[in-house]
Image (tube, helix red, strand yellow):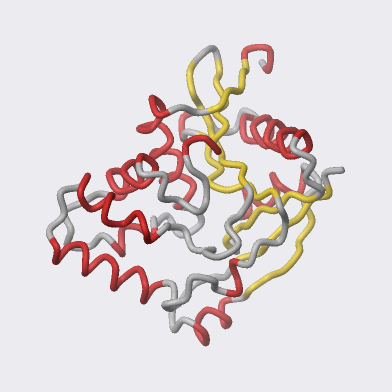
């Protein structure tokens, strides 16, 4: 089976596929994309927003050039981003690019203001939330396999390629984060050698952000 697989770096021609990948990666285990809450009332879908975000190079969690795409028989089936984390802003969106995104989406000033206010409230108004502090110099994010292609080992093949990319760039550690309850992802990462590094439980988010959220666990893997 794996003789049919190929990995390649993403290009802007892959934007619709990457938007779908980032959307799918955001769903488990709650089956809900957090962008949808922030976009309420704007008339913009999560997929439309993610594509505009990627087009504007506005993501702190992996832009187009950071994504590696896995193809099966020439068809893209999975992707994930590997990148060096920002040292100033740990949250998903580069707010300096928000007006560019708004222009592409043809938002009114009211839509832009409403989204900005929700974004800041959602992340606690802090661009460096403690629970998002990078635990490694090589971070893997937005890992997803298309629903119709799951259960065939594509996720592991993609992650192995991204780990090799990190080694080639002389990084010593790779980091990845999982929402608690996403057992499929957790088992996949542990099977590749990732070890739990730090867990933030549900009570951390209820106390710090006043939200109901299952929490996250950060994993690390020594590369060299």
The image quadrant where one finds the C terminus is: top right
Image point (45%, 44%), residue name:
22
Furthest-right residue in view? 224
Residue 153: x %, y % from top left:
65, 30
Residue 202: x %, y % from top left:
56, 77
Q: Quadrant of residue 129?
A: bottom right
Q: Quadrant of residue 121?
A: bottom left
Image point (79%, 40%), residue name:
170
130 sits left or right of 164 in the view:
left
Furthest-bottom residue in view? 207
Q: In the picture shown, does residue 100 fall above or below 132?
A: above
Image point (49%, 23%), residue name:
76
Q: In the picture shown, does residue 76 fall above or below 124?
A: above
Residue 42: x %, y % from top left:
18, 58
146 sits left or right of 171 in the view:
left
40 sits left or right of 1 in the view:
left
Q: Nearer the viewer, residue 144 or 122?
A: 122
Q: Nearer the viewer, residue 172 or 50?
A: 172
Q: In the picture shown, does residue 2 fall above or below 60?
A: above
Tally of marks: 0
Image point (49%, 72%), residue name:
213
The image quadrant where one finds the N terminus is: top right
122 sits left or right of 61 in the view:
left
Q: Nearer the viewer, residue 130 or 171?
A: 171
Residue 3: x %, y % from top left:
68, 12
């Amino acid at each position: 089976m794996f003789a049919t697989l190929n990995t390649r770096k993403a290009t802007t021609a892959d934007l619709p596929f990457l938007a779908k990948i980032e959307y799918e990666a955001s769903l488990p285990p709650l089956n809900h994309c957090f962008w949808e809450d922030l976009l309420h009332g704007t008339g913009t879908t999560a997929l439309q927003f993610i594509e505009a975000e990627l087009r504007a190079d506005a993501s702190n969690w992996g832009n187009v050039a950071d994504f590696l795409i896995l193809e099966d028989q020439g068809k893209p089936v999975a992707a994930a981003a590997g990148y060096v984390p920002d040292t100033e802003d740990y949250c998903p969106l580069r707010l300096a690019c928000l007006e560019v995104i708004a222009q592409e989406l043809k938002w009114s000033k009211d839509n832009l203001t409403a989204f900005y206010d929700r974004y800041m409230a959602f992340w606690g108004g802090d661009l460096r939330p403690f629970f998002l502090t990078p635990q490694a110099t090589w971070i893997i994010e937005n890992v997803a396999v298309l629903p119709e292609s799951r259960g065939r080992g594509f996720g592991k093949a993609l992650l192995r390629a991204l780990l090799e990319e990190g080694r080639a760039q002389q990084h010593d550690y790779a980091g990845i984060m999982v929402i608690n309850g996403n057992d499929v992802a957790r088992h996949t990462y542990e099977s590749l050698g990732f070890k739990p590094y730090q867990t933030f439980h549900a009570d951390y988010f209820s106390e710090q952000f006043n939200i109901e959220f299952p929490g996250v666990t950060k994993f690390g893997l020594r590369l060299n």
